[in-house]
Amino acid sequence: MRAREALDAERVRTTPRGHYEGQPGFRLLSPTTGTLDTAEVAEQASVDPDQTLALLADMAAAADRKMAALAARLAGRLALDLARAGASSAGGVGRLKPGRADLCSGDIDIDRSLDGLLEARAAGRSVALDELWVQRWQRPATAITLVVDRSGSMGGPRLAAAAVAAAACALRAPQQWSALAFGDQVVAIKSADRDRPAPAVVDDVLRLRGYGTTDLAAALDAARAQLARCTARRRVVVLLSDCRATAGGDPVAAARRLDELCVIAPAGDAADAEAFAAAAGARFAAIAGPRSIPDAVTTVLQA
């Protein structure tokens, strides 16, 4: 099944309203069947963004498709807002750098080349390449592949954390980044060689629902293949998982084939992930909730 077909199939599975009734804050956001109070969403997001985002992410699978679509849009906006609040660049965007035209190619830099042009004109000769300067793009400093574990249960807080992680990675490596989701199979939400806006990627992440076994080794190998398409000097895999592999090959061996691996796991369920990171020589961070993701990503990238 292709990635788009797999993601579209996620929309088929829906959740009845009764599933949400007992969740804290649900009645405030949706006081009656088929309604979603956007003003109350904004109010609750200002008080407890983690809980609000988790609830909205869960509601994106509601059987009421109109309400589900609105919940997904609001969840996407909140995820992006949380990611921006802690954003700092990891050097993902390429930069213009001057160079002599006889040593590299690029667009001519008139200002830097002016002396050479004037001297050649005064002497009645053609300008030499070593008298001209060009501006050329340096390759980006960092490429990131986000790998999201969607095996087992994938609702509420885990889904919210994944959405914020996608937004955070997009902001830190906007030119070269990719996002994968995995259970027993790996789905490319965004490929490294395909341009997609961050909101569209976050929306696809919010479609994910958990099922299947956990083939961690296959996911890490797929991440390595994504980064092989990138030109950035630094290539980093950010893994959002409890790291309890239940299928496939040796995940530690797969992790050691990566240039860099950063593991992020929920603080209340981090023991296996921390042990895996230690065995694989990876960096590790535990998160208290979705809004902890941006700082965690920044920390592991700067370590």
Image (cartoon, grey):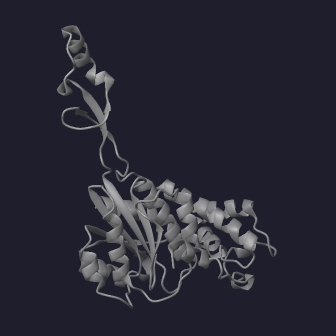
Residue located 45% across and 55% down the image? 171
Q: Nearer the viewer, residue 165 or 54?
A: 165
Residue located 44% across and 86% down the image? 184
- Numbered disc total: 0
Would residue 36 be visible to someone looking at this image?
yes
Tell me if 72 is positioned left or right of 132 in this view. Answer: right
Residue located 53% across and 83% down the image? 210
Q: Position of residue 264 (x, y in %)?
A: 39, 72
* Snapshot quadrant of residue 253: bottom left
Would residue 292 be visible to someone looking at this image?
no
* Snapshot quadrant of residue 286: bottom left
Tell me if 86 is positioned left or right of 60 in this view. Answer: left
Q: Nearer the viewer, residue 252 or 86?
A: 252
Q: Outermost residue, front direction?
A: 125
Tell me if 273 is positioned left or right of 163 in this view. Answer: left
The correct choice, above or below, for 184 with respect to 225 in the image is below
The correct choice, above or below, for 218 with respect to 176 in the image is below
Q: Position of residue 64 (x, y in %)?
A: 75, 76
Residue located 60% across and 66% down the image? 48
